[in-house]
């Protein structure tokens, strides 16, 4: 089958939530999604063991790329996405989903992804006032993006502000016009700081632990695996 979309995770650690999160995304994204794990020098065997045991039936949908680093700080992660065009050469599709070890898809709402495939960028909305006027969508931890637009932003931001986190850098760009959903629509994509009863996924679900757990008890596993 020709895979039309890609989901990516950058994770150089032997993170104990990785197996759970990878299985969650492989199970809840349809077969036309492949997953790329950008790993490090220290966790290659750890990931291979996960794939060969818990994820064996999904092997054909998983690719591994070694970033040849031992670990990444938050700033180094942002710099990788904001300035390394070669990184994007590894992503074979125009549409790609970014996820992390503190994210998951909520199974009962997994079909909501189809509504957002039309957009250039979408993440959980931010509630902060300075990021209004279209710049409050949104968080990059779980985000859907168009590769051509990310590369265009990198190209046009000749002197990017490298003190920014990558999601602010991309979603708040003034150099490239991005087709993004409204604040209210974005709530249906992911919950982070702004709660929504109906949403495709979540990032750092402990922020709204009780409210989310009442609706989606499966989030508790992710929370515990992140030592929260």
Image (spheres, grey):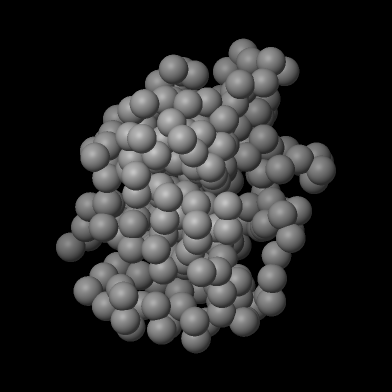
Q: Residue 181 occupies which quadrant of the picture?
A: top left
User: Compared with residue 107, is residue 207 higher up or lower down, i.e. above or below?
Assistant: above
Q: Is residue 166 left or right of residue 139?
A: right
Q: Residue at x 56, y 37 (%)?
A: 207
Can you give x and y, in whole percent of width and height, for residue 141 in the image? 55, 46
- Write down the quadrant of residue 64 in the picture: bottom left
Q: Quadrant of the N terminus?
A: bottom left
Label total for image: 0
Is residue 15 shown above or below 46?
above
* Image position, residue 27 (x, y; %): 26, 57
Give the image location of residue 56, x and y in percent.
27, 78
Residue at image coords 56%, 74%: 14
Q: Can residue 118 be seen in this view?
A: no
Q: Is residue 51 above or below residue 173?
A: below
Residue 100, given in percent of the width and then of the height, sits at: 52, 54
Question: 21 above or below 139?
Answer: below
Task: Judge by depth and name the residue closer to the eye, 124 or 168.
Answer: 124
Residue 87 appears in the rendering: yes
Q: In this view, does 11 lie to the left or right of 57?
A: right
Which residue: 41% across, 84% down?
49
Instruction: Locate residue 65 relative to residue 21 in the image: left or right.
Output: right
Residue at 58% x, 58% y: name it.
227
Q: Nearer the viewer, residue 226 or 124?
A: 226
Quadrant location of residue 48? bottom left
In this rendered view, identify the residue nearer to me: 186 or 36. 186
């Amino acid at each position: 089958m020709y895979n039309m979309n890609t989901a990516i995770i950058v994770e150089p650690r032997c993170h104990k939530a990785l197996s759970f999160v990878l299985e969650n995304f492989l199970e809840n994204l349809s077969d036309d999604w492949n997953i790329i794990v950008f790993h490090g020098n220290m966790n290659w065997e750890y990931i291979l063991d996960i794939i060969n045991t818990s994820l064996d039936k999904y092997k054909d949908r998983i690719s591994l790329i070694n970033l040849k680093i031992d670990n990444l700080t938050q700033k180094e992660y942002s710099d990788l996405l904001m300035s390394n065009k070669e990184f994007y050469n590894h992503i074979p599709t125009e549409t790609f989903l970014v996820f992390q070890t503190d994210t998951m898809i909520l199974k009962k709402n997994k079909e909501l992804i189809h509504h957002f495939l039309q957009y250039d960028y979408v993440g959980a909305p931010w509630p902060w006032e300075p990021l209004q006027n279209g710049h409050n969508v949104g968080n990059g931890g779980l985000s859907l993006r168009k590769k051509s637009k990310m590369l265009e932003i990198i190209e046009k931001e000749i002197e990017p502000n490298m003190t920014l986190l990558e999601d602010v850098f991309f979603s708040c760009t003034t150099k490239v016009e991005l087709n993004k959903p409204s604040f209210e629509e974005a709530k249906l994509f992911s919950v982070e700081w702004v709660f929504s009863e109906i949403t495709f996924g979540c990032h750092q679900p402990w922020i709204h632990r009780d409210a989310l757990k009442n609706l989606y008890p499966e989030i508790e596993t992710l929370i515990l695996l992140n030592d929260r």
